[in-house]
Image: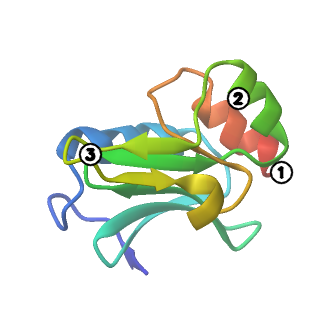
Amino acid sequence: MEKLSQGQGVVHPDVEERMKELSKNLEGISLRRYKNSIVIKSDNLSAIVAVAFGTAYSIKVGLMFKHAIHSGATTSHHWSDGTSLDLSESFGQDWIVGAWENNEANWIHSGNA
């Protein structure tokens, strides 16, 4: 994985900015580019905790999954071309679709500590 530099890949600029916001105040977190995606990596866990792709992003909320779902988070994303992505099938049972919620950085931190 390489360090993030502005304007590479196929991630929408608004989503790229959101990923920067999410990673900004989290300790032990680094923002990286992997292939055509942007990822947030937990250096402590050596694990990816968020992934951006195109106009969407997803976050691993770990132990905060039930709380996130209760707060309105979803596990599937549908694009305008009719395709969809079910995160529980593709990423795992503790991933949700990012929705610019204020609690997302806290969910990443608390759920993956």
Left/right placement of residue 9 relative to residue 20 reads left
Residue visible at 26% across and 47% down? 82
Outermost residue on the front side: it is 82
Residue type indicated by callout 3: Thr
Find residue 27 and report its horizontal and vertical position in percent: 67, 49
Secondary structure of the residue carrying tag 2 is helix
Q: Which numbered mark, 1 or 2, is in the foreground of this view? A: 2
Earlier in the chain: of badge 2 and badge 3, it is 3
Residue type indicated by callout 2: Ala
Secondary structure of the residue carrying tag 3 is loop
Earlier in the chain: of badge 3 and badge 1, it is 3
Residue type indicated by callout 1: Ala
- In space, the residues marked 3 and 1 are separated at their CA atoms by 27 Å
Residue 78, compared with residue 84, is above or below; it is above
Q: Which numbered mark, 3 or 1, is in the foreground of this view? A: 3
Residue at image mark 1? 113
Find residue 46 and report its horizontal and vertical position in percent: 70, 74
Residue at image mark 2? 68
Badge 1, how many Cα within 10 Å: few under 14, some, many 20+?
few
- Front in this rendered view, residue 106 or 78: 78
Find residue 40 and report its horizontal and vertical position in percent: 52, 58
Quarter-of-image position of residue 75: top right
Left/right placement of residue 26 relative to residue 10 reads right
Residue at image mark 3? 55
In the rendered picture of this protein, how many numbered marks are placed on residues? 3
